[in-house]
Image (cartoon, rainbow, N blue to C red):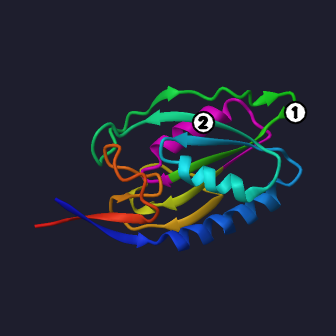
Amino acid sequence: MSKLRILIPKEEIERKVAELADEIRRDYQDKHPLLIGILKGSFVFMSDLIRKLNIPLEIDFVRLASYGAGTETSGTIKQVHGVKTPIKGRLGDRHVLVIEDIVDTGLTVRFFLDYLGRRKPASLKLCTLFDKPSRRMTEVPIDYVGFTVPDTFVVGYGLDLNEEFRHLPDLCVLEDQE
């Protein structure tokens, strides 16, 4: 059995999302960016973020898999659902901002940034709400970071364990119960 302990309460998350939105809004004013969320975990963060941005933008989603069932990455990244919005579109080369829930080993995000980079967007940046640099296996340039979290498995605010706990409004740590 596991017990949940709140690591970052929803009020702190709300404040940080607003701060990130302010920073992104300044950087992307008049650029009509394409925000690409990495599913499934980023959907809660991205939803809250775009409501606070208040600038013209487009959204798309990609679904990448590296975990399967459990808490350890397999190290193999596969694209389950790809980007549908053209990077070179009616507005010219797009300014792309990737939205991720958590950067852990960096393998998934590195794979996706390399994939997008080959499509030569006007700019390519990464925003993550949670960063866990202690687990990094590959270097990842993160342009917008909400919180740095310790090397522990976290759930809530879109993050899951075997599809559970996404609904929690806080970021929580699963603690083993004896």
Q: Residue at x 53, y 44 (%)?
A: 109
Q: Distance between the residues labelled 2 and 1?
A: 19 Å
Q: Nearer the viewer, residue 129 or 50?
A: 50
Q: Going 60% across and 56% down the picture, which residue do you hit? A: 142
Could you tell whether 64 is left or right of 47 in the image?
Answer: left
Q: Does the magenta stretch include residue 103?
A: yes
Residue matched to label 1:
91
Q: Where is residue 19 in the image (x, y as percent from the top left)?
A: 68, 69
Mark 2: few/some/many CA within 10 Å (<14, 14-19, 20+): many
- Residue 4, numbered circle: none
Residue 143 at x, y percent in the picture: 65, 57
* Residue 20 percent coordinates (x, y): 67, 64
Q: Nearer the viewer, residue 130 or 21?
A: 21
**Mark 2 sits on what residue?**
61
Residues in magenta, as a range: 102-125
User: For residue 128, which quarter of the picture?
Assistant: bottom right
Q: Is residue 63 above or below residue 105?
A: above
Q: In this view, does 142 lie to the left or right of 31?
A: left
- Image quadrant of residue 167? bottom left
Identify the element where label 2 is drawn. Answer: strand
Q: What element carries label 1?
A: loop
In the rendered structure, the answer to whether residue 129 lies left or right of residue 18 reads left
Q: Which residue is drawn at 60% across and 36% down?
A: 61
